[in-house]
């Protein structure tokens, strides 16, 4: 059995950020990073671009081996964790090896969900969550002319766009009235869908999957509840993700949808933290805990966990998860942050929406009294990072609120320049 001071399971954004944060305060303590992947660390967000051939494989990796060597970090690749014992302070690998730790961070991410569609077991389908998935999809695409994407989130939309860029005829299945319902209101989502349709992507909304059937030549037919049949050479499931927590059964670590953590990213077990897509953490806008599977959230949680693991004197507790999603598609760009899906005003909520006559620029600002709580935009000159900071700092716009509404980019930059001093 090997021993390490800091053990980090998972090697994407949350794990890497935590490791780098630890090294800033502890240059000598032994750090071991364990990843189920056979490769160097990469971001799942880059995979749709790799699939479309826009990014070569050698450019998808976040760090090279020399980086880990320089920081004196042991990186174990191809080492899947299958068990944990919080009392004994050990984790067990699929190889049978065990690692003893002093402090443990779980950043195992999330895997793709496979909904139990009738007939799904009779057809070939793809998911896109790791590099192996992406490589398999690229190989399948070489012999394909058409694809069906089931899902309504960013993974589904990114995948549909890049399949279209690769020359395939693409159809999307969205069970809800609009796609991207978790990030945009109906008006904004409708504008995005129109841009997709204008670029040849058919989007079938408001109807779930009734059944999936095999067809000639390895193709499949997706029959919708509306009665519409979609036929494709490739079937891609992008219907959500689920935190990887199955290895924690009997570990003594409390879980729900994900690993339950507090504002220090500590779990219920001593000397164990969790961060990223696997963590179910406190929310920013309301009580309760949620899994927020976004890149900015993973980085923030990784930093908080790392600082707490080394008792960094500059430590600040996690202020709670809030959405920040950016989306580039067919030469356009969109983002949403905070409570961006609110469409109608209430006694406390003000909604300010701008849609230019061209129909290609959309902007929505959501206020709770004099505080900004949500922003969504399509092709608008706004900085999502600044908007997020104004929301999370609960900045009182007060007398400059009208100026902010008329010129949010310039006013936001001016405000943050003062707040960051």
Image (spheres, rainbow, N blue to C red):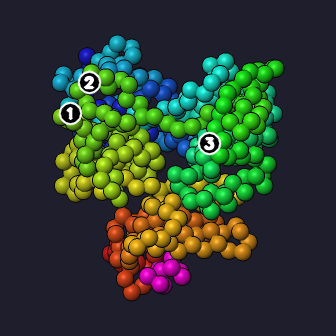
| Pick the front one: 397 or 191 | 191
Q: Is residue 342 left or right of residue 317?
A: right
Q: Which residue is mark 3?
A: 175
- Going from N to C along the chain, the mark reached first, 3 or 2, is 3
> Magenta segment: does it hold 403?
yes
First to last magenta residue range: 401-411
| Pick the front one: 55 or 363 | 363
Q: Which residue is mark 1?
A: 269
Q: How far apart are the two marked residues, 3 and 2, measured between alpha carbons? A: 37 Å
Q: Which residue is mark 2?
A: 251
Residue 35 drawn above or below residue 367: above
Mark in the foreground, 3 or 2: 3
Residue at left offset 59%, top offset 34%: 128
Q: Is residue 308 left or right of residue 144?
A: left
**Prevailing secondary structure of the magenta residues:** helix
- What is the quadrant of residue 26 in the picture? top left
Res. 105 in view: yes
In the picture as drawn, the residue positioned furthest to the front comes out as 226
For label 2, count other residues whose C-alpha is less than 10 Å away and answer few (under 14), some (14-19) or many (20+): some
Which quadrant is the C terminus positioned in? bottom left
Q: How far apart are the two marked residues, 1 and 3, measured between alpha carbons? A: 39 Å
Tag 2–tag 1 contact (CB < 8 Å): yes
| Pick the front one: 63 or 182 | 182
Residue 354 drawn above or below residue 188: below
């Amino acid at each position: 059995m090997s021993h390490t001071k800091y053990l980090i399971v998972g090697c994407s954004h949350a794990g890497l950020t935590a490791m780098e944060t630890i090294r800033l305060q502890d240059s000598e303590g032994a750090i071991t990073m364990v990843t189920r992947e056979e490769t160097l660390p990469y971001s799942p967000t880059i995979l749709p671009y790799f699939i479309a051939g826009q990014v070569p494989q050698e450019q998808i990796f976040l760090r090279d081996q020399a980086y880990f060597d320089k920081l004196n970090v042991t990186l174990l690749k191809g080492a899947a964790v299958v068990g944990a014992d919080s009392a004994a302070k050990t984790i067990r690998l699929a190889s049978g090896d065990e690692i003893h730790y002093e402090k443990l961070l779980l950043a195992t991410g999330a895997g793709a969900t496979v909904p139990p569609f009738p007939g799904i077991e009779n057809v070939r389908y793809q998911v896109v969550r790791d590099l192996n998935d992406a490589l398999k999809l690229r190989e399948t695409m070489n012999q394909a002319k058409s694809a069906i994407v089931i899902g309504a989130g960013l993974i589904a939309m990114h995948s549909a766009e890049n399949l279209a860029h690769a020359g395939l005829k693409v159809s999307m299945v969205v069970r809800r009235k609009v796609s991207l319902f978790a990030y945009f209101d109906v008006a904004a989502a409708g504008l995005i869908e129109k841009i997709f349709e204008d670029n040849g992507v058919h989007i079938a909304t408001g109807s779930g999957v009734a059944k999936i059937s095999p067809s000639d030549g390895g193709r499949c037919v997706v029959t919708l509840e509306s009665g519409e049949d979609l036929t494709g050479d490739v079937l891609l499931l992008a219907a959500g993700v689920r935190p990887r927590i199955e290895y924690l059964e009997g570990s003594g670590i409390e879980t729900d949808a994900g690993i339950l953590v507090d504002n220090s990213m500590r779990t219920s077990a001593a000397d164990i933290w969790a961060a990223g897509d696997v963590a179910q953490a406190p929310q920013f806008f309301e009580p309760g805990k949620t899994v927020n599977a976004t890149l900015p959230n993973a980085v923030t949680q990784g930093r908080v966990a790392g600082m707490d693991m080394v008792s960094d004197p500059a430590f600040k507790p996690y202020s709670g998860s809030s959405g920040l999603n950016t989306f580039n598609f067919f030469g356009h760009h969109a983002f949403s942050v905070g409570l961006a899906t609110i469409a109608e005003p209430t006694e406390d909520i003000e909604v300010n929406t701008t849609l230019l006559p061209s129909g290609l620029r959309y902007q929505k600002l959501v206020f709770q009294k004099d505080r900004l709580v949500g922003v969504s935009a399509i092709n608008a000159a706004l900085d999502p990072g600044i908007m997020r900071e104004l929301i999370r700092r609960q900045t009182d716009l007060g007398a400059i609120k009208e100026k902010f509404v008329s010129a949010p980019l310039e006013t936001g930059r001016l405000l943050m320049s003062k707040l960051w001093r």
